[in-house]
Image: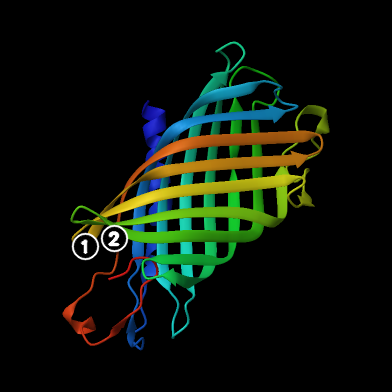
Amino acid sequence: MKQTLKKLLCGMLLLAMPMAMFAKKSKNDTIYRPLYTAFELNIGGAAWVEKPLSYFTFNGTNLSLSLEMMRACRGESKWVQQHQLRYIYSTGDMAISGNGGSKVQLVNYTFGMMTYSTLAPKFRLYYGTDLNILGGMITNLHGGNNPKTLKGDISVGFTGMAVYDFKLGKVPVTTRYQMSLPVLSAFIQQKQGYFATGLGDGWTGGSWGRHFNMRNRLHFDLHFSSWALRLGYNNDILTNYATPNRFQYVSHNFVLGFAGELMRWSQKNANKKIKTALYTY
C-alpha cells in the first residue's frame, strides 16, 4: 500500500507540472478566456494481455489520476485547446488461476485542438484533432528472465465531443461525451528474451490495423457557484501489434472529481468579452 501511495503522489506531481505553463495569460489579451481545469480520480477494473512474455490474460483493479485543462484560443475564432495528463496504475492476477501478479504503469499526455458548432441553444458539437503520447512499463511478477517491458507510442487522430447543458432541479449540469481515435501512429515495444537486441529494438509504425487506441468519456458536471462536481465514466482501449509482441489493455472506470476556473474572474475583467472553452454562462 505504501508503494502504491508513493506512485500516486508521483503521479499527482506529474499532473501539476504543466499548470504553470498553460495558465500564463497575456497582458495584451482584451478577451477574458477562463482556464477551465478539472482534477479527476478514476477507479475501476482492467484487463490486459502481453505476448510472448505472457500468454495469459490478467484481471485487476485500475486507479488513475488525471488533470484536464481547456481554454479558448485567441481572437474571434471558435477553436479551443485541450490538455490532458494522466497517471495510470493497474495491478492484477492471471484470469485462469487467480495468482501470478502483473502491474501496468502508464503516463499519458494528450493535446487537442477543436472547433465547435452550436446545433441547439444548449447543445454544442466539438470536433478536431489531437496528439496523444503514451509511455510506461508492464511488470510481470510471476517470473521470467525479463519481468519488465517498456513501451510507448505517439499518435495523431480525431477527437469529437458532444456537450449539452440542462438543469437538475435548480442545479445547472453540463453533460459531455468525448471519443478519441488515432489515425497515424508510431510505437515502440521492448522485445523480450532472444527477440531483444537493445532498448531501441521494436520501433515500427502503423494505423488502426496494428495500433488501436480508443478512449470514451461520459461526464456530468454539477455546478455549485464557481466550481463543479464531476461524476462519470471512462473507458480506455490500448492495443499494440508489433510482431512478435502483442499488448492489449482495457479498463472501465468510475470518475469522481471537481472542475472550475483555475484563473478566477476578477473586477479588472469586468469590461472584457468572455470567451469560454466549455461551460456557458
Instruction: Name the residue at 53% across, 49% down.
Output: 108
User: Which of the pair 214/16 is nearer the observer?
Assistant: 214
Place residue 250 in its image quadrant. Answer: top right
Three-letter amino acid code at the position of disc 2: Gly
Query: Mark 2 Cα within 10 Å, few/some/many (few <14, many 20+)?
Result: many
Instruction: Name the residue at 33% across, 88% down.
Output: 30
Residue 226's disc is 1
Three-letter amino acid code at the position of disc 1: Ser
The secondary structure type at the circle numbered 1 is loop
Give the image location of residue 16, x and y in percent. 38, 55
Residue 157 falls left or right of residue 82: right
Residue 217 falls left or right of residue 134: left
**Circle 2/circle 1 CB separation < 8 Å:** yes
Residue 217 falls left or right of residue 204: left
The secondary structure type at the circle numbered 2 is strand
Tell me if I can see residue 259 in this picture: yes
Instruction: Name the residue at 70% across, 41% down.
Output: 240
Give the image location of residue 171, x and y in percent. 21, 55
Place residue 19 in its image quadrant. Answer: bottom left
Residue underneath mark 2: 260
